[in-house]
Amino acid sequence: MHDLRRQALESHKTVSRKAQSKQSSIASSKANSAVNSRAASRNVSRAGSDDEDEGNLSDDASLSVNSLDEILNADDLDQSPEVWKSELSDRIEEITDRKRSSVQGREKALATYVHILRSRYAHEEIRGRETGLVVSILKSIKAEISETETSLAMKALSMTLITSPSEVIYDSASPLLKRIVSDSTSIPTKVTAIHTLGACTFYGGASDDEILENMNWFLEIVSSDGHYIEAPDEAGPVTAALEEWGFLATLLDDLSEESEEAIETFADQLNSSDAEVQIAAGENIALLYEKSYTPLEENESLSDSDSSGSQKQGSSKLVKRYTAYRRTDQLVHTLSSLSSISSRGLSKKDKKSLHVNFADILNSVQFPTCGPRYQNAMDPNGKTYGSRMVVRIRGEGVMRIDKWWKLLRLNGLRRVLQGGFVTHYENNGVIFESLP
């Protein structure tokens, strides 16, 4: 990740996504997401779809009725470059000139700024202005004058960092964001601050030690059921902390020392009454089992003990490095129950989402080398299909989500970018490198 930030800082030119797709045959899709739906923006795998057998991330899979193509073509997205660039420049002036601004004016300016940066890749347009922008944005967050301004300012910070990553902003922003999470009386503000802290840690210059420190902080929120941040038994902050823990965990190669305690905490959340909490906890568990296996090194052989019970035909050659969790048998029993749960108290949507997701999670706990939507069925050539979750982009190609780390990173990026994911995937080199 540090290489991604360095790449963005050292080179202000990015190869367009379309050009890169010709070289690597990777392209974007008609992945679908609702701009204003938290459930849609947080998870592309929350439910099945008509294309479920193929693992496509379709409208149903993202809990959305609007496709990204519709969102990207809506409203002012047909504006000429001159128009939106001028609009962006004016809004930046309003954001940075706080002396002559009102709360309502700042809210409008921040909303427009976030909208433009999501729907366009505007690195060149904000280059050289990041410092003034971040200083003013942090002032809006710190003042917490209105819930709307605070929330928009945090989203503006996330979009600024994804558009132009930094090696230094984390140090200034993280203490403030943690204070908002801990002290704000607004639950939605706490949730937004948690997600912003995740993005800031990812793209703002945090060291590996700081990444791990924030993961432990998120784990405290989860293990206390929100009490740690004065949000007792609130599903929103707990879900957000689970999601950002998983997002940051994709940055670290070795979590052997953290695995046991983390899975113990996540296993407790499988008993939550909230489906989103359960699924976010389950995905983190699958990620940790996946991380306990790494590729064979040169001149290393796969022993019988390493391969037994954890390999499936067609899976890549991976070797078990450590035991992810000592009580796997108990965990498997819980996951199996969730994959076939039939409680009358569940909505049809939640029941379907739990069934689909926990079938995948259970499979990966039992067979850690198998990613989401793994299938043993053979294709016409006699090859195992393997993980069949894909993102199809504008009909030009696919991005295969065959690892849990890819799914959790995709979810994290879509939480920030929402309807602008395709645009950034095609044009923002940092996003391209984040999801190879």
Image (cartoon, grey):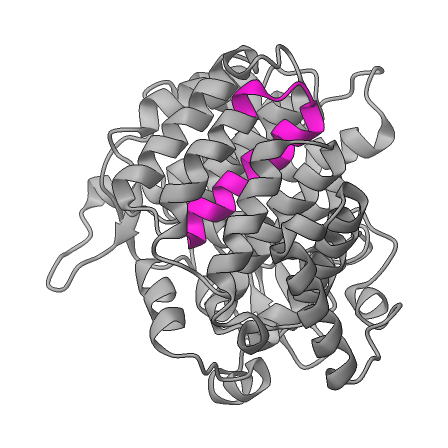
Q: Quadrant of the C terminus?
A: bottom left
| Magenta stretch: helix, strand or loop mostly | helix
**Is 333 in front, or is 166?**
166
From this view, report whether residue 312 is shown above or below residue 321. below
Query: Is residue 378 rendered magenta in the image?
Result: no
Identity of the residue drawn at 28% across and 30% down: 323
Left or right: residue 417 compared with residue 127: right
Query: Residue 289 placed where, x, y %?
Result: 39, 37
Q: Furthest residue to the left?
A: 299
Identity of the residue drawn at 75% across and 72% down: 87
Query: Residue 65 placed where, x, y %?
Result: 88, 54
Q: Furthest residue to the front?
A: 100
**Is 354 in front, or is 39?**
39
Identity of the residue drawn at 87% across and 68% down: 74
Kindly tell me whether residue 364 is visible in this rendering.
Answer: no
Query: Is residue 202 rendered magenta in the image?
Result: yes
Identity of the residue drawn at 81% across and 21% down: 346
Kindly tell me whether residue 238 is visible in this rendering.
Answer: yes
Total marks placed: 0
Residue range of the region highlighted in magenta in the rendering = 181-204
Q: Quadrant of the N terminus?
A: bottom left
Left or right: residue 394 compared with residue 7: right
Query: Residue 424 placed where, x, y %?
Result: 61, 69
Quarter location, residue 401: bottom right
**Is 235 in front, or is 404?**
235
Quarter location, residue 282: top right
Query: Residue 196 placed where, x, y %?
Result: 55, 42
